[in-house]
Image (cartoon, rainbow, N blue to C red):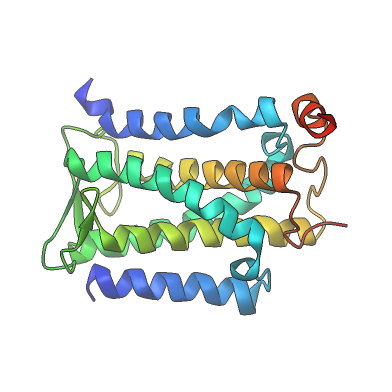
Amino acid sequence: MRHLSYLFVLAGCLISALWLEPVLKVNVLRRGRRLLLTLVPVVVVFVLWDLGAIAAGHWTFDPEQTTGIVLPGGLPLDEVLFFVVVPVCAVLGFEAVRAVLRKPAGDEE
Amino acid sequence: MTYTAAALLGVAGAVLVDLLVLRTRLVRRVAFWATYPIVFVFQLLSNGILTGRHIVIYDPRAIIGLRIAYAPVEDLFFGFALVLLTLSTWVWLGRRGVQRKPAAGEGSRLLAKVRKW
């Protein structure tokens, strides 16, 4: 179970945000192609940053508290998932705020 | 380069993308600044667990040492860059016509009810 510590944190983030989809109809998951296209550059940029930081020794990961699946460059799978989960939660939150406040973001018709 | 320098560069890069590259100008919009505090609270929580439980460990030589809820202050900048780049890309895609619809809140009976009331 200890190996799942990092994943539990990510699951907590998802649980905190995913309810916005059905309850407020933020329609983020329904716009899956746009979400996927958003994730691609973000994951690429931040995985590169992470690989650089790992190489420079800025941070390390506890092998006991991560899945143990490590990608080339010493990047744990857990960390890659972080760069998927956090952006998904951020977009859900952003669209929820927009749904409630009805403030423009610049992509309206 | 230290994490401190990298984090500040990351914020500068994300702001540059938002203002000059994708021109989404989210840092000048209420919608963004109303969202960020909510994201920030959850960031403090999740980051606090990741660092407080030593799931992620930082080299003390790479950070200035100021910590907020266990997490090095650099993480807050890292998170800001991550969220701003994400939302800027999301809005840019919408502006280019990628799945602009269904818009946020469209079809929500709850929101319709609240508004009527």
Residue at x 29%, y 75% (from the top left corner): B5
Q: Nearer the viewer, residue A102 or A81?
A: A102
Q: Farthest residue toward the bottom?
A: B20
- Rendering coords of residue B43 (x, y %): 39, 47
In the image, residue A53 sits, relative to residue A32, either above or below, namely below
Count of numbered circles in the view: 0
Q: Farthest residue toward the front?
A: B117
Q: Nearer the viewer, residue A54 or B54?
A: B54
- Rendering coords of residue B74 (x, y %): 29, 63
Q: Is residue A99 left or right of residue A84?
A: right
- Rendering coords of residue A105 (x, y %): 72, 59
Q: Nearer the viewer, residue A46 or A87?
A: A87
- Rendering coords of residue B77 (x, y %): 37, 64
In the image, residue B9 sits, relative to residue A54, either above or below, namely below
Quadrant (top left/top right/bottom left/bottom right) for the N terminus of chain A:
top left
In the image, residue A80 sits, relative to residue A13, either above or below, namely below
Quadrant (top left/top right/bottom left/bottom right) for the C terminus of chain A:
bottom right
Q: Farthest residue toward the left?
A: B60
Q: Is residue A36 left or right of residue A52?
A: right
Task: Choose top left, top right, bottom left or bottom right for residue A66.
Answer: top left
Q: Is residue B20 left or right of residue B65?
A: right
Q: Farthest residue toward the right?
A: A109
Q: Is residue B102 left or right of residue B41?
A: right
Residue at x 53%, y 73% (from the top left corner): B15
